[in-house]
């Protein structure tokens, strides 16, 4: 019997999140707070599971919360300014609570006023429920403002809606940490928004994700194999899923295509075989190039450090990395600070190393 591959690689999870119970619980608390639900920003590096969290809360809106989800990246080329964003949000509200859409011409001509009225109608229809508007890929707002497709006061406009009704809040998600949102137009809103960091899974949660990707999964892992996967991924959820996915695929190839008999249990040797294959780095390339690309932004020297550090599987000291990169001390310190903030490197007791071992290997192979 071919094993159906239970691991999800790349697409956001619509349900069955692993290891995010604390965040989901916290969100519920924040939104149950009288007299007003709190706006939040979920932030974290690429493929850490931000969208999955938003999709999950949108899918399980409860009796006192209605969540609508909009991905700002999918609107990337807007030509009609903020009216177009409000249109996208109204579409979702309209679907979710069965409220006729606002007049499109009016919305584009008088966006702020028309949307405000629409929100008021929505709140009325929702009776005692709160409305949470989830805006994913939050960086897009900054890009659109820079491209003059949105007014510089867009965040203040959003804040106005929250101030208008005590039943409305926003849930933003994106890559930027709060320290990085220094532009004035963010500040007006963000001082009142609660930041929530989306980070690596723990060792125990990584085991859980591997061993029980769904209730019907028949294959098992030796504990050492799961530990090995944790050590290679540091609990990066996408990479954990990718390794699980490749293991199942290899199992199917061995047992069905090649007709081998083998135990239905994954060992460290299986994991080692997977990471020797080029396929892992092929399949995972968007993740790896995404992290690498982010290291080219804002603070100089980050990629130099990664290239240098990749030669040290056990890590090395600041002095060593300064010597290998030849970076000036202040540049080095800034770059290290950014890399740590983005969960790319970690420093313990004066020792610097890659957080994710597989990313170190990719860097070594590719750069
Ligand atoms: N809680 C989780 N449990 C299990 N797997 C997860 C979890 N969160 C994320 N993943 C894995 O990571 C992948 C990416 O998740 P998601 O798209 O939600 O991340 P993201 O942070 O929104 O990424 P991006 O920054 O690229 O938008 C999923 O396809 C899945 O493989
Ligand atoms: Mg996302």
Image (cartoon, rainbow, N blue to C red):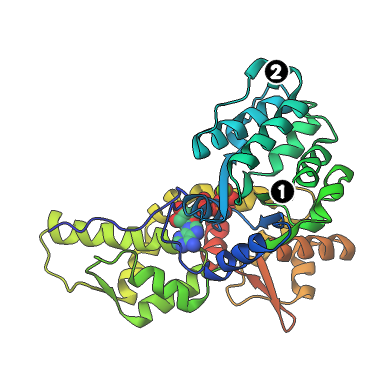
Q: How many other residues sit within 10 Å of disc 1, few (<14), some (14-19) or many (≥20)?
A: few
**Rendering quarter of residue 41:** bottom right
Residue 156, how many percent across, how many down?
83, 40
Q: Secondary structure at mark 1?
A: loop
Residue 188, how many percent across, how many down?
87, 48
> Who comes first in sequence, dot 2 or dot 1?
2
Q: At 85% from the left edge and 34% from the top edge, which residue is drawn?
A: 152
Q: Which residue was labeled with disc 1?
A: 296
Q: Which residue was labeled with disc 2?
A: 106
Q: Are marks 2 and 1 in contact (CB under 8 Å)?
A: no
Relative depth, front residue between 349 and 312: 349
Disc nearest the viewer among 2 and 1: 2
Is any part of residue 41 visible from this angle?
yes
**Rendering quarter of residue 208:** bottom left
Q: Secondary structure at mark 2?
A: helix
Q: At 44% from the left edge and 53% from the top edge, which residue is drawn?
A: 13
Locate residue 42 relative to residue 278 in the image: left or right: right
Locate residue 194 relative to residue 129 in the image: left or right: right
Compared to residue 264, the image places residue 277 above or below, namely: above
Looking at the rendering, in which quadrant would you find the N terminus?
bottom left
For the residue with label 1, is its CB less than 8 Å from the closest atom of ligand 1?
no
Compared to residue 147, the image places residue 12 above or below, namely: below
Q: How many marks?
A: 2
- Compute the Cα span from label 2 to label 1: 42 Å
Is any part of residue 366 visible from this angle?
no
Relative depth, front residue between 144 and 259: 144
Residue 139, how many percent across, how many down?
70, 43
**Rendering quarter of residue 335:** bottom right
């Amino acid at each position: 019997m071919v094993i159906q591959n239970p691991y999800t690689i790349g697409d956001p999870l619509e349900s069955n999140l692993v290891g995010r119970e604390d965040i989901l619980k916290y969100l519920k608390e924040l939104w149950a707070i009288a007299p007003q639900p709190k706006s939040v920003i979920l932030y974290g590096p690429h493929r850490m599971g931000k969208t999955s969290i938003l999709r999950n809360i949108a899918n399980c809106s409860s009796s006192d919360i209605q969540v609508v989800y909009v991905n700002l990246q999918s609107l990337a080329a807007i030509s009609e300014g903020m009216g177009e964003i409000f249109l996208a949000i109204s579409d979702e509200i309209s679907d979710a609570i069965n409220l006729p859409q606002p007049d499109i011409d009016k919305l584009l001509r008088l966006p702020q006023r028309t949307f405000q009225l629409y929100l008021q109608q929505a709140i009325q229809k929702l009776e005692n429920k709160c409305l949470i508007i989830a805006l994913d890929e939050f960086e897009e707002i900054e890009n659109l403002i820079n491209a003059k497709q949105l007014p510089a006061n867009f965040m203040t406009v959003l804040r106005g809606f929250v101030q208008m009704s005590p039943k409305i809040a926003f849930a933003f998600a994106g890559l930027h940490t709060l320290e990085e949102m220094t532009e004035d137009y963010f500040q007006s809103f963000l001082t009142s928004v609660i930041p929530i960091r989306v980070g690596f899974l723990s060792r125990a949660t990584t085991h859980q994700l591997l061993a029980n990707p769904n209730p019907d999964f028949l294959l098992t892992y030796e504990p050492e194999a799961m530990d090995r996967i944790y050590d290679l991924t540091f609990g990066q959820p996408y990479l954990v899923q990718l390794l699980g996915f490749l293991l199942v695929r290899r199992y199917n190839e061995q047992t069905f295509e090649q007709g081998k008999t083998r135990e239905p249990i994954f060992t460290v040797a299986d994991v080692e075989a997977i990471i020797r294959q080029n396929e892992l780095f092929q399949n995972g390339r968007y993740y790896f190039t995404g992290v690498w690309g982010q290291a080219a932004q804002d603070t100089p020297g980050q990629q130099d450090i990664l290239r240098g550090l990749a030669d040290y599987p056990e890590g090395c000291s600041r002095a060593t990395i300064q010597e290998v990169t030849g970076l000036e001390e202040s540049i080095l310190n800034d770059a290290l600070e950014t890399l740590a903030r983005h969960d790319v490197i970690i420093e313990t007791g004066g020792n610097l190393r890659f957080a994710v071992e597989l990313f170190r290997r990719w860097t070594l192979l590719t750069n």
